[in-house]
Image: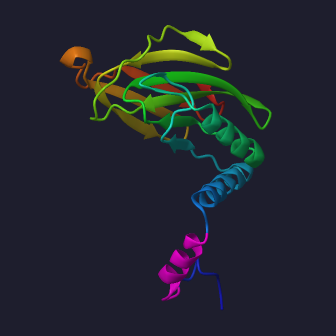
Amino acid sequence: MSGGPLTVPRPDWPQRRAWLLSGLSREERTWRRVCTIAASRKAGGRKALIMGVHHPPFSQGGHSGSPLMLQQIDDACKAAGIGPDALIAGHSHTYQRYTRIVSIAGKQTQVPYLVAGCGGHNDQAVGVASGQTIGDHTFVKSTRGYGYLDIVVDAQHLQIDFHLVLGPAGVPGAGRKSFDSVRVDLATGKLA
């Protein structure tokens, strides 16, 4: 037989895949994906890695941040020798952006951590972001209201824009103009 099930699909491959995945926990599947991305980067490939979680590691509004979530993410990234280019969370019905300075595989990076849980459920109060630094992260921007993220990735950059559709007290947002924008240089791991 030439090739494996990933290169030469067999008629029963969907059933085999379903059986295999049913035996793996969500954490194991996530770990396998992270290791695959890490191996690709070590071989010279470079794609943006955006991690998505429900509970935000940091939060100044609505719901509190989760230090346990942050520790689990840090442990997995350290073990794999890779970290996210951005992390997006929900749970808190607000928009918040933090910049975290973290060393990944010996390289210091600036990673945007975004809370974007304001897609339609009741908005919540949020603290004012004024560039205050708390430990290894800075609280950069925040608002309450309703909005969405627009994410664009190319070979060199990761661009994330937040569009505020309806702001506090029902005030219309800026329309097509973004309320906040962050751009990551994928080669340097720094904000551009």
Query: x, y (%) of residue 60?
Result: 49, 19
Q: Which residues are magenta?
A: 10-23
Image label count: 0
Taken as a whole, is the magenta stretch helix, strand or loop?
A: helix
Drawn side of residue 54 relative to residue 33, left or right:
left
Magenta includes 14?
yes
Q: Is residue 171 visible?
A: no
Quadrant for the C terminus in the image: top right
Magenta includes 162?
no
Q: Residue at x 59, y 75 (%)?
A: 20
Q: Residue at x 74, y 48 (%)?
A: 80
- Snapshot quadrant of residue 141: top left
Drawn side of residue 49 relative to residue 172, left or right:
right
Query: x, y (%) of residue 28?
Result: 64, 60
Drawn side of residue 178 relative to residue 165, left or right:
right
Query: x, y (%) of residue 166?
Result: 23, 23
Q: Is residue 35 visible?
A: yes
Reply above or below: 102 against 16. above
Reply above or below: 137 against 16. above
Drawn side of residue 4 relative to residue 103, left or right:
left
Query: x, y (%) of residue 174?
Result: 25, 19
Q: Residue at x 64, y 81 (%)?
A: 4
